[in-house]
Amino acid sequence: MLCYQDRRTVLRATAAVAAGSLTAACGTGGAPPAPRPVQAAPARPDAAKPAPAAAPAPRRFPGQPVEIAHGPRDRPGVALTFHGNGDPAIARSVLAEAEKAGAHVTVLAIGTWLDDHPDMARRILDGGHELGNHTHHHLAINSLPEAEAYAEITGCAQRLKRLTGSIGTWF
């Protein structure tokens, strides 16, 4: 993931985001959203148009653990990670502001959001950002039985694969 080298630049570039973001932050309070039926992605209107490049596949980073808890601590930098859910107009605005500032962000998308707004997967990737899996329904995954937790992860992975050609790099 690309990061800013100067934290003040990050604060200036993301000031517009202060009034809104891709969605409210993840939380544990309140009831989880009810599962919604899967909707098929609309057919591409121009079948002759070449298919877009696939999203990056999962990969390991040499010398890094399976779960990365923080970036390098020997230099200043900020990783911008957003929760992919909510109003797509706000998401497009946040992505555009990040791009104007030369920033690349990671969007961890909820599968049902991708079902409702399949164009957002390509918008994120085509802007040079990273797209990851944030489960299908955004349930409290740690409280689910193993089979249900696995279904939540694979459900979103299937959406990502269908829309981008890859299950994405990040979970």
Image (cartoon, helix red, strand yellow):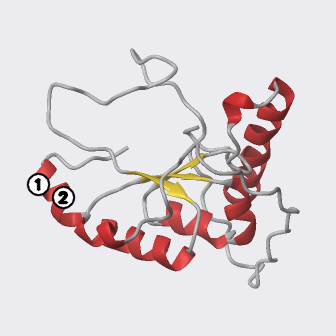
User: Callout 2: helix, strand or loop?
Assistant: helix
Q: Nearer the viewer, residue 78 or 59?
A: 78
Where is 8 relative to 47, above or below? above
**Residue 17 percent coordinates (x, y):** 32, 68
Give the farthest residue toward the front: 30
Q: Position of residue 80 (x, y in %)?
A: 35, 50
Q: Which mark is residue 8?
A: 1
Distance (Cα) linking label 2 and label 1: 5 Å
- Picture coordinates of residue 119 (x, y %)? 64, 72
Which residue sits at x=59%, y=46%?
29
Amino acid residing under circle 2: Leu
Q: Residue at x 82, y 26 (%)?
A: 145
Quadrant of the rendering where the C terminus is positioned: top right
Residue 36, image x and y in percent?
83, 62
Instruction: Establish if 22 lies above or below 81.
Output: below
Q: 10 Å neighbourhood of mark 1: few (<14), some, or many (≥20)?
A: few
Task: Identify the mark at residue 52; answer none if there is no mark.
Answer: none
Pick the quarter of the image with the N terminus: top left
How many numbered badges does the structure rendering display?
2
> Do the residues bearing badges 2 and 1 touch, measured as CB atoms within 8 Å?
yes
Residue position marked by numbered label 2 in the rendering: 11
Q: Is residue 13 left or right of residue 65?
A: left
Q: Nearer the viewer, residue 55 or 12?
A: 12
The residue that appears at 61% across and 63% down in the rendered structure is: 121
**Secondary structure type for disc 1:** helix
The crowding category of the residue bearing disc 2, from other C-alpha atoms within 10 Å (few below 14, some 14 to 19, many at least 20), is few
Q: As shown in the figure, which amino acid type bears the numbered disc 1?
A: Arg
Residue projecting furthest to the bottom: 45
Please identify the quarter of the rendering in which residue 109 is found. Answer: bottom right
Instruction: Name the residue: 56% across, 74% down.
Output: 87
